Amino acid sequence: MASIRSKDYGGFNHATGSAATGSGFLIWSGSEQLIGNQPTEITDYYGVGMEMIAHSGSYFRFQTDTDGAQTSALDIRTDIFFLGSDAAFISGSGDGTIAISSSNFELLEAGKINATAGDIGPFVISANGLTAFTDPTDSATAFMKLNTPEKLLQIKGDDLQFVDISGDTGLRIGPLAAPSFSVGMDGRFSSSYATEVGNHLDPRNYTAKWNISSSKDVSDPVAFISSSEFKVGYAGQVTASSISASGQVFEGTYHTWEASALTDTGDDSNWQGPPGKGIYDGNQWNVDLGSDYDDNTTTNTEVRTSMNAGWKIPDSANYSCSIKTMDIYIAPARNITFANDDNFSCSLWYSTGADIKARQNVDTSAGFVQRHAASVVGTQCGRGDGSTPFIKFNNYYVSQSIDLELGPGAVLYPVIKTFGTNNFNNNIYWIVNYCKIPL
């Protein structure tokens, strides 16, 4: 290779490498390999070219052949550049912005574009606006026009629709003199089928009679929405000549799962849960679950014998359940004078349908996955906080909001424990509220 280069210049990869100690220049013709200080600083040269390197962020490099396959390249890295003349140029100021200027087009550094001529697809740019034509040689065939405030948007078609937004005219669609639809600046609207009269809509030129009103008269459901055979009143009452619906119709009201039991929480601070035979057939929650539910920031793998000890959404259900809240009523059932720090914690966990299916109809004896839904402690009712104790056999109420949706096959698991100076059994009544969502 014939070349002219700086003394000790080790090639492009050496000059732009991590050490960046080999800045310089090279003008070459032919093929050669230059080697820097490291094995990774080998640069192959082909064809004809020149390069001037300061470092990896500042250099000029031109090559007629980059890979021996006649692939040419021009690569310039610089903070500030200017290409062109005062009349037309492309420039960069070094702060990440770029500017382009010509006689009819200007891109400013702030991102603003100024253009007075040219085309964007079917749209023609002029000093007055933007217009699209079916025939670019005939301005009479414009089908869309963005122009001055007096005619901000104009659309032409077979029906000669016209939209005018100017002064206090508002929005009009259709011929300007008799638009098929219009909205005034005060918000009132009119169309060929209905017009706003007072506080309601009156139909016109339309056979079916209907009405939408803001009346609050609840004596007869003629307000809000009304037609000849269907009415919705202000208070929500509905009357109709007939109503039919296909599929299952669900109410928006709460459904509940409930359980009552005596909890075996009087001898330690371990979690206790319903028996394995099920939550509805156990007067005593005496399954010792140890510290399984102490960490509610992660999942819990529970033994398979507890899989049925919860509230289950049937696998055949045609709905999912949106779990809303839980209400818990607690009556301490130990005949003692309670200490100020005696307390209880109720925690609700769940397994999805997929969690349950993974452990059903299989031969393994492994446990199944449970996930935390919500927890609440006795301090919510002002007791067990270190200053005010529970009173034996009195009833206390705590609750917790829940935002959780579960599908068919899922199960919810309630567990409870006591802690403090004294452990104690409880009579508990636990309610979970949910809404059904049709699938």
Image: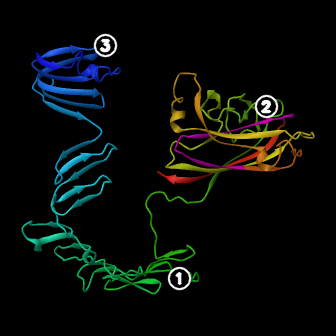
In the displayed structure, 435 sits above or below 72; it is below
Residue holding disc 2: 269
Read off the residue under disc 3: 38
Q: How many numbered markers are drawn?
A: 3
State which tag comes first along the sequence, 1 or 2. 1
Q: Quadrant of residue 415?
A: top right
Q: Residues within 10 Å of mark 2 (few under 14, many from 20)?
A: some
Q: Residues within 10 Å of mark 3 (few under 14, many from 20)?
A: few
Residue 250 location (% of width, % of height): 53, 58
Q: Residue at x 55, y 43 (%)?
A: 314
Residues at marks 1 and 2, CA–CA distance in whole angstroms: 61 Å
User: What is the distance, in whole Å, between disc 2 and disc 3 at their CAs?
Assistant: 65 Å
The magenta stretch spans which residues? Answer: 399-423
Report x, y in % for residue 395.
83, 50
- Which numbered disc flags the more N-terminal residue, 3 or 1? 3
- Which numbered disc, 3 or 1, marks the residue closer to the eye? 3
Q: Residue at x 16, y 50 (%)?
A: 85
Helix, strand or loop at label 2? It is loop
Q: Quick one: which residue is furthest to the front in this view?
A: 7
Measuring from the top left, give residue 379's x and y in whole percent. 78, 45
Q: Which mark is residue 215?
A: 1
